[in-house]
Amino acid sequence: MSRTLVIQLARLGDLVQTMPMIMALRKLSPRDTIDLLCPEPLRDLGTLIPGLDRVVGWDGARWHRWAAQATQGLRPNQREEIEQELRALCPHTYDRAFVLNQHTRAIVAGTLLAKECVGPLAHGPLSEQLTPWAAYVREIARTRRSNRIHLSDAFCGMCGLLPPGTPPRCLTPLLSPSRNLEPIGQGGGPWIGVIVGAGDPARQIPIEVWRTWIVRFLAVLPRGRVVLIGHGAECDRARDIQHAMPPSILGRIWDLTGQTTIHALAQVLARCQYVVGSDTGPLHLAAAVGTPTLGWYFARARVHETGPYGSGHRIWQAQSEDGGAVVPATWPIEPSLDVLLNTSPRAQSQWSHWTSQIDEWGTYYSEAGQSSAPPREREALWHELSPAMPV
């Protein structure tokens, strides 16, 4: 048996989108020890990912301080302090580390903690040459050209793995619901989770748009309920969304912003019939717990790269003539409500409508009204970027 460390030091959404790679690795190596190194605030999320033996939290703030101090020279005892911290994190050296970030901190962590690193660099930590998959991901991000390989599947390719072919699912959190969570999903319905914000301010759906959507939803579905989801810094957005709404509507809205741990958030998302939001971490977590999602993708978010993973998710993609960031003039309020009413979604100017599928090459999205057959270029790209892999 070998010991493997998966390193993902980015945000919540990136960690969720690492799950297909972990699933593929576990299928390939059922007897190996597979651990995860992730940011300390996301450690609880790591405990919900199946296939892992241990989750190690990375204190990014502490390591950043050490790095800043090192530029001016290490204190006499600081090297020993760092070595002790590494031994506490990982008492044993790993046989290999899969590094999923192109950031220096992740590459250094893999080099320090494992005998061999697999990831973005082709020839070790001091190399500037990217592997074919890492170069492809960087080029897509830089040029914004057409792309049909999902980021989760690119993570698999970067690690020399094929996508698992089925969407992974988070484990069910083992906790009793608190009093304010217990009613969610019980009676009435459908229960819709509304993600009020986004980590990237450019991807925040305007407050007035959310207010309009919620009022329309509660009007057309009299038994419907809304759950407002967000972290503590988004409580003001949630309050502004509810401002001046009639009491009859407010009685059908549960505001949970700033009130959920990661485990509680996963449980809330699993209790909803749908979750609506922009390209942000909780939307990907909703897909990972098995809840269908309705995504509004704009700014620089692109459905083919980071649409929710799996099948049956619906995305409205804002159109851009030059491939740059999009600030929508209209919003797909009515088309997304059509989905909840089980009617054919109407067209919306400036937006295209996509639905997700999954096959042996991973997740892909087909445009509404077009063939759902997988795009041929995906298989060709796998052969091009993974020539040594038996694909």
Image (spheres, rainbow, N blue to C red):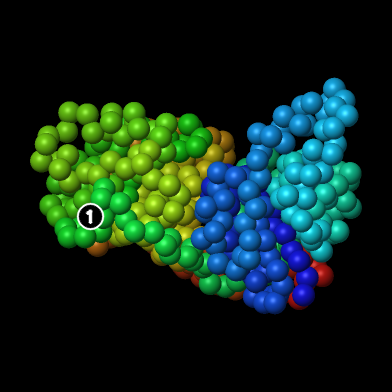
Q: Residues within 10 Å of mark 1 (few under 14, many from 20)?
A: few
Residue 385: quadrant of the picture: bottom right
In this rendering, position of residue 379 left or right of residue 351: right
Residue drawn at 74 percent across, 64 percent down: 4
In this rendering, position of residue 210 left or right of residue 109: left
In this rendering, position of residue 176 left or right of residue 278: left
Q: Residue furthest top?
A: 72
Residue drawn at 60 percent across, 45 percent down: 40
Residue 104: quadrant of the picture: top right
For disc 1, the marked residue is: 183
Q: Is residue 51 above or below residue 227?
A: below
- In percent of width and height, residue 218 lies at 17, 47
- In percent of width and height, residue 35 lies at 67, 61
Q: Is residue 305 above or below residue 364?
A: above
Q: Amino acid at mark 1?
A: Pro
- In percent of width and height, residue 370 lies at 44, 63
Q: Is residue 99 above or below residue 319?
A: below
